[in-house]
Amino acid sequence: MDELDEEDALIYSHFTHNGFVAFKEFFFEAFFVGFVIAIFFAEAGAFGIDFPDDTRGFFGEGIDEIDIASKALEVLPLATYFGLALGGRGLGHDFHFGQDCNRNTIWPHKETHALRIPHRKKYANFSYLCANMALAHTRIYGQDSPLPRPPEGRRYMAYVETYGCQMNFADSELVAGLLHQEGYSFTTRPEEADLILINTCAIREHAEEKIWQRLRYLESLKTVRPHLMVGVIGCMAERLRQRLFEESPVVDLVMGPDSYRHLPHLIRQVESGTKAIHTLLSREETYADLAPLRLAPNKVSAYLSIMRGCNNMCTFCIVPFTRGRERSRPCQSIIQEAIQLAKAGYKEITLLGQNVDSYNDNGLRFAQLLRIVAEAVPNVWIRFATSHPKDMLDEVLETIAACPNLSPYIHLPIQSGSNRILARMNRGYTVEWYLERISAIRRYLPNAVISTDIIVGFCGETEEDFQETLSAMRAAAFDSGYYFMYSERPGTLAARRYKDDIPPEVKKGRLEQVIALAQQLSLESNQREIGRVHPVLLEKVSRRASEDLTGRTFHGKAVVVRDIARSHQPGDRVFVRIREVTSATLIAEATDASPLGVD
Ligand code: SAM
Ligand code: SF4
């Protein structure tokens, strides 16, 4: 197996593993029913099943979900046989799908998943079977009767709740677009919704705990609104799949990040009385043709997703397993959406990808995309996230310096300041390389604001490694950042290779030290702004004082502009002079003076 094969194998074995677990539970039932069917065939003189070389022939191409329950009955004797033959050998993770596809698809939607079985073909065929059985299992053990419908003549109301990263917020807007097409209207109160979708995050254990808590609350809602349909979508849905049905009775629908297109179909499935699941990862899906419905009340800033998935396989990270392989959205569809947003009055667009520096639309790379977008919507400020230190090129920095509406805000996660830990994390760079990239940013963009992500307490992190992280923070002089305690995620490379051996209290202590230093660095960075003039995009009324508006400077710092609410409104751009600062915010007043080089 070459390196890429191994990565694919990991991703796919992770998700087929869930199929196996379900299969194992299903197996005993399958055995008995299969046994009865086998006797029937034997009695009829028809028993003697030939195992097909290629399961495509057996299942038919692109079988539809509707057929799965009946197909499951067809495969029961086979399931019994396979179960008997292989059950004792341990089903573990030893099944893998190859890298390139020849589209031997037997998954319900052939466009969403394709795979090839270059070797160990029979195991892969078996895992096809298990996965389909798992789906059938879900259907067979779904609800008994159709959900009651809301009172006649009323429009269905949807409530979409989003957890996690900006990408999830962008995805929720895609899903909202689909619901809108289906005739749903939207509410901000789950208590009055007919459909609740929770878009979930799996990045840390704590993120998932919050979702379980939320589902417990939704159980109480369902007791008073029996027709309520609840869906869990996004990364946790992709990771846990049918376990969500098993562990939370309130969940009717489970849908992974590459399955949103199937939402209308899944809703109808739940309405007809079965639980619905679609969690197949795709190599092609970019949702380029779907129109998001902007949910945020602020019609000033919008997220625009330019890629999906990630190929990096940082050892701590669940994202490649929940969001699949990296795909770049075609440049043309990005431009179209940017132009639509500008026409709709948006003043700021953030381009999103897990690693924007590896954007590649048939050879068109990120720096070119940035320039094209910036020129297509010259009156819109453009930001982006996330850059990867191993891939960020000078060309991107040159482009930002050359285009007046590209914000010099760079989010460049370092994760650790120790080369030994960076190697264990499989980040693909050293601290020296990282700090050289910081120097390059400051060289091209002297005004840049740089933020970062740091994980403390990764497996095997010594006090010395940790001190190196603090030193790197000082050397990079970060303006801001996001700081986390390492949280082991099942199925990741780190969970397989290393022991999560740093005690929680040590992780906590290190996190506190990182936050204290970060606050000091942010304060120093903000103090350098006192007296400077910046263009600011006003976003909303301040929660603390109704005469103030809050917003962001062009280079990405949060700012409160005093006494401006009477003369201006969210969406306006103004020049401000910075008067005071805290470690988190600049406090400013509007001014007529324009800063050098910006007008
Ligand atoms: N793609 C981005 C990158 O490579 O920097 C980040 C994506 S991830 C959604 C956001 C951040 O979560 C990461 O940069 C990392 O600091 C943090 N993170 C990811 N996995 C984690 C884990 N298992 N435990 C703690 N923090 C984690
Ligand atoms: Fe996760 Fe690394 Fe990909 Fe970021 S680059 S999403 S941390 S695997």
Image (cartoon, rainbow, N blue to C red):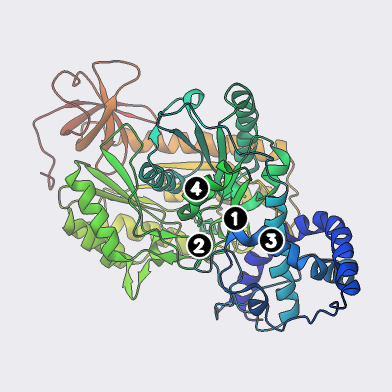
Disc 4 versus disc 2: nearer the observer: 2
Q: Give the distance between the C-alpha atoms of the residues marked 1 and 3, in whole angstroms.
A: 38 Å
Q: Which badge, 3 or 2, comes first in the chain's sequence?
A: 3
Nearer-the-camera pick, 543 or 178:
178
Q: Which class describes the residues within 10 Å of circle 2: few (<14), some (14-19), or many (20+)?
A: many
Q: Evaluate if marks 2 and 1 touch, with contact meaning CB atoms under 8 Å apart.
A: yes
Disc 2 versus disc 1: nearer the observer: 2
Q: Position of residue 501 (x, y in %)?
A: 76, 49
Q: Three-letter amino acid code at disc 3?
A: Ser
In the rendered view, tell whether residue 596 sits above or below residue 123: above
Q: Three-letter amino acid code at disc 4?
A: Asp
Disc 1 versus disc 3: nearer the observer: 3
Q: Three-letter amino acid code at disc 2?
A: Cys
Q: Which badge, 2 or 1, comes first in the chain's sequence?
A: 2
For ligand 1, tell me if the residue under mark 4 lies within 8 Å. yes
Q: Which badge, 4 or 2, comes first in the chain's sequence?
A: 2
Q: Residue at x 29, y 65 (%)?
A: 331
Q: Three-letter amino acid code at disc 1?
A: Cys
> Residue tagged by mark 3?
70
Q: Which badge, 4 or 3, comes first in the chain's sequence?
A: 3
Decide if residue 403 is in sight here.
no
Q: Evaluate if marks 4 and 2 touch, with contact meaning CB atoms under 8 Å apart.
A: no
> Residue tagged by mark 4?
453
In the rendered view, tell whether residue 553 sits above or below residue 136: above
For ligand 2, tell me if the residue under mark 2 lies within 8 Å. yes
> In the structure shown, which secondary structural element does the residue marked by tag 1 occupy?
loop
Decide if residue 257 is in sight here.
yes
Disc 3 versus disc 2: nearer the observer: 3
In the rendered view, tell whether residue 2 sits above or below residue 521: below
Q: Which class describes the residues within 10 Å of circle 1: few (<14), some (14-19), or many (20+)?
A: many
